Amino acid sequence: MSSIDNLNDSAEVLPRNKAPRDWRREARDWRRRLGISGDSSGTNGKASRTWLYTLGIAAAIGGVVNTANVITLWHGAPARGLLAPVITEGSSFITSLLFFWIIWFAWCVAPPTVRPRWKLLFHGPAAILYSLFHVLGFVLLRKLAFDLAGTSHEFAGNTVREFLYEFSKDTGGYVLFLGAFTLVNRLLNPPLPATTPISQATFDIRDGARVSRVHLDDIVAIASAGNYVEFKLRGAKTLLMRSALSAIEQELAPSGFLRTHRSWLVNAKHVSGFVPEGSGDYKIELGGFTVPLSRRFPEALAKLRGT
């Protein structure tokens, strides 16, 4: 019986001796899945810095652009004073930052540089949602601000046309900041130098307080097992670690580990052959066992054939 079966069997016994729920641990797991954990077994805080640095860039760019717009509007109609331009541009600036997390969440779910490419379709509804919240937010802020100031303000007559106009601008900003997240993340996570032998690299597998340091060359494949991942090592040894498979993929991808299935990562150095399964799927031979290669990961097949 495999370790995954043992894990499932143990999960069925847990309700009889149910331990207190570890809310702090569950919160760490969710932060790791969103890429903002800072945990040593996940992103080491680099994703958190990606978020903060890109938010700072967005605030700086937005501040400059909105200040220039205020000056332009005031210059075009000086008789109206500065209040109306400040409220108009300031409300847009505040709500764009307030809902900036939507772009961040979409980037975490579907980074532009990560396969499979169909995940990029997620950015369509995310861009619409961001623009919708942005527009509704600044309309409400403007109404509140003008009411408090005791002045009147005429809002756009054709709601659909004005929303499409704002959506076109928000889409440009959305794409710009997706690129900013990607660039900042790349600067914080530079690729491994080509001169560094992978065989010298190690990886710490944590199971509670126990830490097993293994060479990357000794890791043959990694499988998802619920809230855990199972490391299959040379010599038929296996180790479990509480983590999301996507977090392990992000950390080990630069070292030659490829996602071949939603539940599997493989070390390309250990692949010895392919067996067609029909409909574009394959079985990958890794010494004493096989791993599925889904047709949804064609880039993995291309890279493995080229290794």
Image (tube, rainbow, N blue to C red):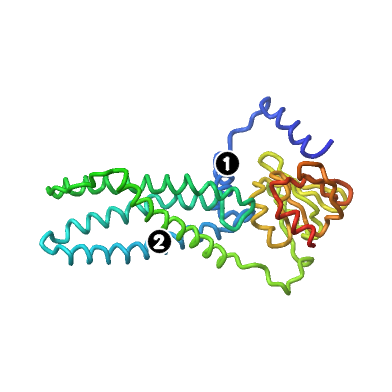
Which quadrant does the C terminus fall into? bottom right
Q: Nearer the viewer, residue 106 or 250?
A: 106
**Crowding near pointer 1: few (<14 within 10 Å), some, many (20+)?**
few
The spot of residue 85 in percent (x, y) is: 21, 58
- Residue furthest to the top in view is 16
Which quadrant does the N terminus fall into? top right
Residue tagged 2:
58
Mark 1 residue element: helix
Name the residue type under label 1: Glu
Label annotation for residue 36: none
First along the sequence among labels 2 and 1: 1
**Crowding near pointer 2: few (<14 within 10 Å), some, many (20+)?**
many
Write the residue at 17% across / 57% down. 83
Mark 2 residue element: helix
Which quadrant would residue 56 be assigned to in this image?
A: bottom left
Q: Are marks 2 and 1 in contact (CB under 8 Å)?
A: no
Name the residue type under label 2: Ala
Residue tagged 1:
26
Instruction: From this view, report whether residue 21 is shown above or below residue 39.
Output: above
